[in-house]
Image: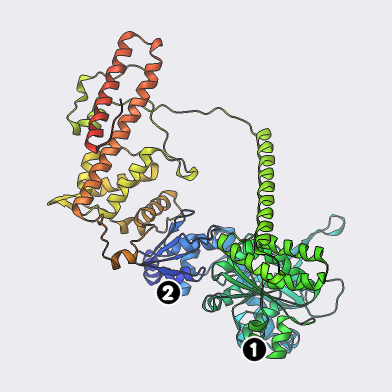
Amino acid sequence: MRIPEETVERIRQSTDILEVINDFVSLKKRGSNYIACCPFHNEKTPSFNVNPVRQIYKCFGCGKAGDAVRFVMDIENIGYGEALRYLAKKYGVEIEEQEQTPEDLLRQNERESLLIVLNFAKTFFQETLLNTDEGKGIGLSYFRERGFTNPTIDAFELGYTLDQWSALLQEGQRRGYSTELLEKAGLILTKEGTDGGKQKMFDRFRGRVMFPIHNVSGRVIAFGARILKVDKTQPKYLNSPETTVYHKSQVLYGIFQAKQAIRQEDVCYLTEGYTDVISLHQAGIKNVVASSGTSLTTEQIRLIARFTPNVTILYDGDAAGIKAALRGLDMVLEEGLNLKLLLLPDGEDPDSYVHKLGAEAFKSYINEHSQDFIDFKASRWLTEAGDNPLKRAEGISDVCASITKIPDLLKRQTLSQRVAQVFHVSEQSVISEINRLLRKQQDQGRKDSERQQRSSDLGRQQSPGSASIPPEPSVDDLNALFGDFGVDASGFDEPKTTALPRPVTVDRANSVRTPISYQEEECIRLLINYGARELEPGITLCQYVLSELHEIEFQTSPLNLILTLFREAYSRGDILTAGDFLNRQSSATEQSNDIDIQHQAIHLTTPRYEISGGWLKHEILVPSEEEIGILADAAYRNILRIKKILAEQRMAALQQLLREAGRKSPEEADQLLTEFMHFKRIDIEISSLLGTVISG
């Protein structure tokens, strides 16, 4: 359903982009803006920039850009309407909409529909826990035995599902949710009847306490369920299957409840189970998450890295816990995070041990017994090796192998000193071993790359390319392009031969850039940022640029569209500003043109670098682009460069035609040469004005 435009505007005015993005990644102030490692691609150095004044973000690494609505759409992978509803809920903006019908749901995309039906299931499980005799007698009693209080149960939205075949199915159908949607959400199962009989549908979760799994923004995307009765035919824990909204390798249990505490404490505690997270949270240790349902994955580590670079793994002290800790160790190091490990006493897990010690004593235990990965590994190797020198050497090599995973060279060098101290060997021998392992990794990587290349070469099929020939230029076109330099094209006849080819439009998606695309981009940047500035009394930059370009069309599609919008607005007596493009996104935001325009505007209004405060402190003055003289010169030179590249393109096309002159009449060849010399004189004149050195 469509949200009224006045409501959309209220949502936008209420939204603070810093608050919105801080829900998903930790921002740090730099100058007047804020930076972070980008949540949309893997990086170690922050290139994600947020401008609180203009309420926009821009990543200089992957190119993602937009406003708060676009950020929510991209990070949550949801549609425009759902992003607006998310922000409206966050900022308490009421949206007046009719109650959704099953037909409305069908018109929404699958992801949004799944989120809605999963939220229904969560509420149904909560109500079953609190309002039914079975729920209170079994489910709530279990949570009470674990020591969970009402605020904790509410915080994690815990629930219970009846020990019946189709309690959720029947309620879902009564509410108008299709069985197909319930099945796609992983809530029901379908079984073929015997002997070709009718299909049977039943609830996936029956007679279990329910642990909703939330994404970073707090939406329920899946469930974990624990059975309470003894039944060897069923697994103790049962998780939702992977769906459009749930990929278990990318999710951490408790991240929504923990993200603010992780940011404040600047460390994330990583455990294994649901109840570990809940018990520690209730004890006041809220910066804790779990990798439930899967071994630790790279995606989960990167999710933690959005909020802190520091991770402490809290695993059980048994063999399985040690194995799990060692398995995740190198993965954490490889992502550039700072790692500590803590194994609890044998037979204990975080849930049981925090109940035994109490919150404060448990915090003290963490601080006193956490080890860095070198001490963690070394203590085990030294215990196992005893006086065996070969085992000690094997242990040194194993620790060095973990150090090679660290991307930071300075960290590797510092840690090599620690290894030498712990194992009582020379630092040079440790460095030599690290370098040997690095060379081995590089050699293996090169072999893998060559093998993939050979495989790719065998499978590659070449297909002939094609090029289109645009219409030939008219005399009016030439006068429009080059009349500013006192050259009249009327003395030349239009060619009667094959039309002159022009370069293919730049394909930004594949990073194909032509020289003119950079100058077109600079022209649009000047227009967006300074179009209304007067270069001299009564002459704005917009007026100057548009008059100089006259009927020239840009070859980069989104830039040409923006130029056209400037021309249309100027013809009405208006001059567009950055805000006209940054706020262009509307209820029709899914249209690619609007998205391209907003993306371009953000790119061209967001400076990547700022003047160092040290320069200002020492009174090192840097001329500002906004000074009229500098701005006028920038616009003048930009126009000259555009026209020079256009002349060069026409010259290159004429040269190609001259190479084929053997198949033409002498008159046609002479005409081509005359035209070439015409453009050559223009090129020389522009080069002179730009102060470019011309050879030959």
Q: Residue at left 65%, top 49%?
A: 442
Could you tell me the amino acid type at mark 2?
Answer: Val
Q: Nearer the viewer, residue 85 or 682?
A: 682
Q: Residue at left 53%, top 77%?
A: 260
Pick out the residue farthest to the top.
666
Residue 470, percent from left and from top:
38, 28
Q: Residue at left 79%, top 60%?
A: 199
Q: Is residue 579 above or below residue 340?
A: above
Disc 2 on helix, strand or loop?
Answer: loop
Could you tell me the amino acid type at mark 1?
Answer: Ala
Q: Is residue 691 above or below residue 371?
A: above
Near mark 2 (Cα within 10 A), the count class, few <14, some 14-19 or many ≥20, is some
Q: Is residue 633 above or below residue 235?
A: above
Distance in Å between CA atoms under marks 1 and 2? 39 Å
Q: Which mark is residue 623?
A: none
Relative placement, left or right, of 219 versus 555 is right
Q: Nearer the viewer, residue 672 or 443?
A: 443
Q: Quadrant of the C terminus?
A: top left
Q: Which mark is residue 359?
A: 1
Q: Which residue is mark 2?
A: 93
Whether residue 235 is visible, yes or no, is no
Q: Nearer the viewer, residue 368 or 233?
A: 368
Near mark 1 (Cα within 10 A), the count class, few <14, some 14-19 or many ≥20, is some
Residue 13, percent from left and from top:
36, 69
